[in-house]
Amino acid sequence: MNRSSIKTWQVFLPLAILCLIVVFYHGLYGNPSYIPPVIVNTPAPDFIAPELYEGKEMRLADYKGKVVVLNFWASWCTECALEHPSLLEINQRYANDPRFVMLGVNYQDKEELAKGYLEKHGNNFKHVRDFSGKISIDYGIYGVPETFVIDKQGMIRHKSIGPIIGQ
């Protein structure tokens, strides 16, 4: 090895070790459940999807001018079942307000399982089916349940990861 390559290694090696220490420290002491809500304060991705019961196409943009609570769920999700009574209560509280709509997005479920879930747990709002998972991908869904609040202008103002119970 010549002198210049030794100098390069003397600079590079400590820098690489320092970077590894920083990454290791973050892995040990960082909050593993923290996921930055990068989609908040951005326009809500529009979608067209079939309504769960009637099968007719529904489009999110049709609700512009209303506050939309958009909840992603699945029949196999135990935390979704825990939060479902709270969603029913919220929708019942605001059902007569023409400026409010709650919409469920069923995440990659078989139709009969999704319908069975709603028959078991109750249903007082519309649901669409996300067959392919494209809607979930557009919203950056990491898992269900996840809930978004979209303002009247179509901007996402809040994202909740996990069940919303008694809120």
Image (cartoon, grey):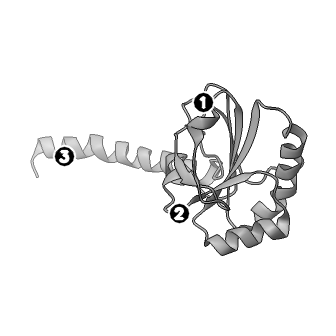
Residue 119, above or below 89: below
Q: Distance of mark 2 from mark 3, alpha carbons?
A: 58 Å
Query: Horizontal and vertical percent for residue 162?
Result: 73, 53
2 and 3 marks in contact (CB < 8 Å)? no
Mark 3 neighbour density, 10 Å: few (under 14) some (14–19) many (20 or more): few
Task: From the image, tell me which residue sits under label 3.
Answer: 6
Please name the amino acid that badge 3 sits on.
Ile
Query: Horizontal and vertical percent for residue 48?
Result: 52, 48
Residue that appears at 57% across and 36% down: 61
- N-terminal label among 1 and 3: 3
The answer to whether 130 appears left or right of 75 in the picture is: left
Task: From the image, tell me which residue sits under label 1.
Answer: 154
Residue 51, above or below 159: below
The answer to whether 40 appears left or right of 13 in the picture is: right
Query: Horizontal and vertical percent for residue 73?
Result: 68, 59
1 and 2 marks in contact (CB < 8 Å)? no
- N-terminal label among 1 and 2: 2
Circle on res. 131: 2
Please name the amino acid that badge 2 sits on.
Phe
Residue at disc 3, secondary structure:
helix
Residue 158, above or below 152: below
* Tag nearer the camera, 2 or 3: 2
The answer to whether 5 appears left or right of 159 in the picture is: left
Q: Distance of mark 1 from mark 3, alpha carbons?
A: 58 Å
Residue at disc 2, secondary structure:
loop
